[in-house]
Image: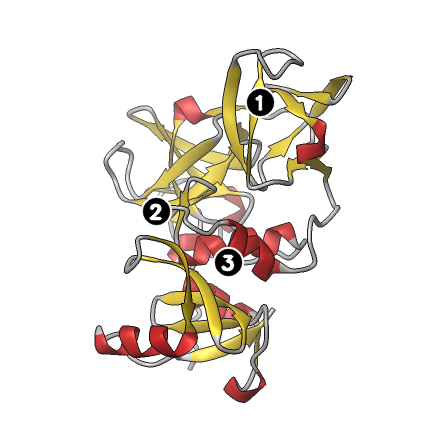
Amino acid sequence: MPDLMPDPRLTLARPDLADLALEGIVAAERYDAPKARQVISPAAALRKAPAADAEQWNQLLFGERFAVLDVQDGFAWGQAARDGYVGWVAEADLGPLGALATHQVAVLRTYAFGAPDIKSRPTGLYSLGALVTVEARDGRFAKAAGAGWFVEAHLAPIGLATTVDPAAVALSFLGAPYQWGGRESLGLDCSGLVQQALAAAGKAAPRDTDMQFNAFQPIDEADRRRGDLVFWKGHVAILLDPDTIVHANAHHMAVAVEPLAEAVARIDAAGVGLPTGWRRI
């Protein structure tokens, strides 16, 4: 019989409090409606507990929405709109819900400036996929609410995929440090790399490797091609071609390109085992 219990990673509920929308679905002492907020920092950690040193489970980018249900010790407990992940985000990284985003960052990373001038003070470094609302233009610059002035060529309108090749996007992260739970261009993990690469191609993906494994179409190993995903227990990589992968991994502590056969042998020797499956996005 299949497990019908909601996934706690994606369910805004705990024994004492749950989302009002879950009344009658999960048991809780009290139900309430979450309040919509959005990320006002270039990147914000979503953590396991309301503490700065708690494990980072996920990461939210500028402009992404977060539904807040509780606040404790300077941290807000809620659910990310992007992928449904539940956890704690520092209140300082959240602000009131603003106007709908009009654009997204379409390059790996870019600065916003305090004025429409590359010699002006940078106000932040923003990663691929960050969401911005353009409210003014001056020459080659676009002013984004709450961020500053971007070179507009580094932005793309919402709804316009920036690529048709997620593998190329993943390759652009080459050398980025491995960061558990990360999704930003300055550091990310294996499933974060997949999520970001697919988002740039206009494709939504869940956050964790097991979720991604279940979300996409199974294929035979012999049919693998560029852009397909190969999974191990707790790990995922993107194929650049049938014999080469790009992945964020803790062995290299970075996004790295590796021959598939070498990765399979190395990961198996480490006790993880052989690939568990192949998927087409």
Residue drawn 52% across and 12% down? 121
Residue 14 position, x and y percent, is: 35, 47
Answer above or below: position of 135 versus 26: above
The residue that mark 1 highlights is 112
**What is the crowding at mark 2: few (fewer than 14 residues within 10 Å), some, or many (at least 20)?**
many
Answer above or below: position of 80 versus 133: below
Dots 2, 1 in contact, CB < 8 A = no
Residue drawn 39% across and 53% down? 189
**What is the crowding at mark 1: few (fewer than 14 residues within 10 Å), some, or many (at least 20)?**
many
Is residue 263 at all visible to an observer of this figure? Answer: yes
The residue that mark 3 highlights is 194
Residue 64 position, x and y percent, is: 56, 36
Specify the quadrant that holds the C terminus.
bottom right
Q: CA distance from mark 1 to mark 3?
A: 26 Å
Horizontal side of 11 relative to 202 (left or right) equals left
Residue 67 position, x and y percent, is: 51, 36
Mark 1: which amino acid? Answer: Ala
Badge 3 marks a residue whose secondary structure is helix
Mark 3: which amino acid? Answer: Val
Q: CA distance from mark 2 to mark 3?
A: 14 Å
In this view of the protein, which residue sits in the foreground, 92 or 22?
92
Q: Earlier in the sequence, mark 1 or mark 3?
A: 1
Q: Give the number of the disc on residue 179.
A: 2
